[in-house]
Image (cartoon, helix red, strand yellow):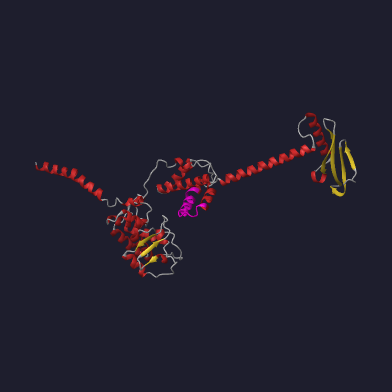
Amino acid sequence: MATYKWITAREGIRYREHPTRKNGVNFDRYYSIRYYDNEGKRHEESLGWASKAGWTTAKANRELMKIRANLTTGTGHQSIRDSRRIEKAQRLEEDRQKRLKQQQENHARDLVITNVFSLYCESSSHKKSLKDEINYFKNWVTPYIGSKRLDEIILLDLERIRKKMTTAGNAPRSIQYVKSIIRQIYHYANTHKIYSGESPTTNFLKKERSDNRRQRYLTPQEGENLLNKVRQYSEKTYQISLLSLHSGMRFGEIASLQWQHVNIENREILVIDPKNGETRSVFMTEKILDMFSKMTKDRRDEIVFPSTNGKKRPRVSKVFAKAVDDLGLNEGITDRRMKVVFHTLRHSCASILVNAGVEIPVIAKILGHKTLAMTMRYSHVSDPSVKKAMAIFNEQVIEPQAKSILAGEKG
């Protein structure tokens, strides 16, 4: 390169040509400029190749004039080195702004409640209720606020969800459940430093308290009639219903039951991984024992009551509801707590035990309740203290009034 001849393009601008490389019709040119600073010191700085940086004599002249003007005014870049340093700083700032914008966009996307819920599900895979939470989220959260960020969701959004659920006939407890899911999502986001704001659920349903527990219990005769009606449609559904009524087992526990958990010799059923997380034993009544004794036993790791595809039953057969309708057990009943459903069999088991005088702690063990408070709901079924109190009321108020009326008639 040192052997290349410099050619003066105009005052303060010169170039040298590449011996072989073309740039358009001319040989490629390498430009430089010369100028004097305010102290009279001469500087020469390289600009670069025309083919790489687009330098021309005119462009080089504009750069030279700009540097001379800046030297005169004391502003802007006063050398090519300054210019390149400023350009580099600008590029770095532009890159920083792009990265910041991308981070903000990513953060905004991460804050969308659907995405946060996905992260929450990954960390909560151990929860037995996760499947229900996913279904509730899919049905009632996704359609209305699924695309919103956590910082965009307000109390009004939740009120709209409540209105939709109420219109669709959902129970207050279901709405409370949705509130709980949303609250847990915000708690997860706070704990994992994804979001630091408050949850909109703070004042949602704050003053509402509802007793959503089922209140309908079958008498022994009603239970027997219902089982017989179910049997007319399906022997398998009858067996499942019989087991629930005679043991208090939940449908999920029955659907998960395997033959290795059934011990006919000891008249014992082992309920593994139930809702409260504590395995328990269930004693077989005579009818349950007779039922299991007559059933064909598959491999010990096989499901006892499989669905038609051989897998675990996802839900109670529709024939159960058909049998309830045939008997008119829900006729005229509008309060869902008073309707007969499959879970009523479990409650009826408890009520029969209470009426028989079985103590609450024993019933709690049978049903697999974690606390006695859960079982105390059945204590009113046959509460002798209430009956005794009302008998006293009758003696003190009703009977004296009756006697007074009779005395007046005689007079």
What is the chief secondary structure element of the magenta stretch? Answer: helix
- Rendered residue at 89%/42% (across/down): 6
Nearer to the camera, 403 or 38: 38
Q: Quadrant of residue 218?
A: bottom left
The magenta stretch spans residue 124: yes
Query: Looking at the image, can residue 362 be seen?
Result: yes
Nearer to the camera, 354 or 114: 354
- Where's residue 194, x and y in %? 55, 45
Nearer to the camera, 206 or 127: 127
Q: Which residues are magenta?
A: 123-141
Q: Residue furthest left?
A: 411
Label total for image: 0
60 on left or right of 190? right
- Where's residue 149, x and y in %? 54, 44
Query: Looking at the image, can residue 328 be seen?
Result: no
- Where's residue 235, x and y in %? 37, 66
Nearer to the camera, 36 or 326: 36
- Where's residue 349, x and y in %? 32, 57
Residue 188 vs 239, above or below: the answer is above
The C terminus lies in quadrant: top left
Q: Residue furthest top?
A: 73
- Rendered residue at 57%/47% (across/down): 110
- Rendered residue at 78%/29% (across/down): 73
The magenta stretch spans residue 155: no
